[in-house]
Amino acid sequence: MYKTNCLESVISLLFPRRCPVCKDIVIPRGSLICPDCMGKLSWIHGPTCKRCGKEVISRDIEYCFDCTKHKRTFDCGMSLINYNDIASHSMAQIKYNNKREYLDFYSEAIYRKLGPRILRLAPDILIPVPVHPTRLKTRGFNQAEELARRLSLKLNIPINTSILRRVKKTAPQKNLGPSERLRNLEQAFVASPLPPRIRSILLIDDIYTTGSTAEACARVLKRAGAEYICVLTIFIGAGG
Ligand SMILES: [Zn+2]
Ligand SMILES: [Zn+2]
């Protein structure tokens, strides 16, 4: 399980792969994560919110607290792992320490655990949540796009990075209320009209917390002609 291919195995002889959880060299060689660290991640097992995919405490709860409180323009959501300290540490390594190789593990895990569901949905394209061009310049990559590229190859679904763009850097959102936060975010994204054959979108991001980024992107994409939008993330904040 979670093995790399042949060429990657040769590369791993020269540059041993590091574990996305403990940062040590992964043993056995060729794996993408230490067997013990697999169990340290808080995998989503459900029950989950029927809208966003967040874990909820009982099967009797249809929607999480955020989804009952706020308008949802996206149609569905799915995620892999609960966002806790371990997840946050791993994500920070990817984003700020250029550990893009960790996304090999996360994309493979998404493919194995959520692949059949994604293929049943049969989205026309994968769209990563974009970052602002100046942030892209300083960081050098967009982790959502890196994830989407890996998934595109595995799922054989094309990725599109030109329809949805981020035109505004968002100010720190901490002091804003939910509706101001959303308005602020909505103005940050623009979407070009969708080509005629593209109606169903899998929107990809690294993490889903309150859902405001996904909602802002979904609003502009629906105005651009999208009919169905599902949000896919590696991590998702705790449910309610
Ligand atoms: Zn490990
Ligand atoms: Zn929800």
Image (cartoon, rainbow, N blue to C red):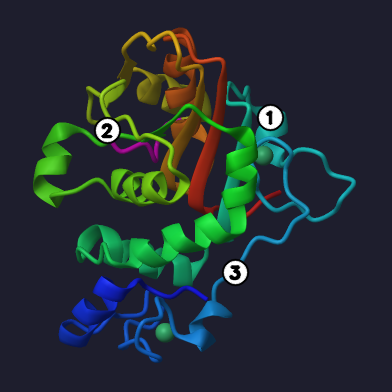
Does the beta carbon at disc 2 come under 8 Å from ligand 2?
no
Q: Give me the residue at 27% from left, 33% from top.
A: 171
Viewer-side residue, 222 vs 200: 200
Mark 2 vs 1, N-terminal side: 1
Q: Quadrant of ligand 2?
A: top right
- State whether residue 90 is above or below residue 183: below
Majority secondary structure in the magenta region: loop
Tell me whether circle 3 and circle 2 mark residues in contact (CB < 8 Å). Answer: no
* Residue 38 shown in magenta: no
Can residue 208 be seen? no
* Residue 173 shown in magenta: yes
Q: Give me the residue at 26% from left, 62% from top.
A: 100
Total marks shown come to: 3
Q: Which mark is residue 69?
A: 1
Regarding mark 3 in the picture, which secondary structure is present there? loop
Q: Which residue is mark 3?
A: 42
Does the beta carbon at disc 3 come under 8 Å from ligand 1?
no
Amino acid of disc 3: Ser
- State whether residue 32 is above or below residue 188: below
Q: Give me the residue at 15% from left, 33% from top.
A: 133
Amino acid of disc 1: Lys
Q: Residue furthest bottom?
A: 27
Amino acid of disc 2: Ala
Q: Which residue is mark 2?
A: 171
Span highlighted in magenta in the image: 170-176
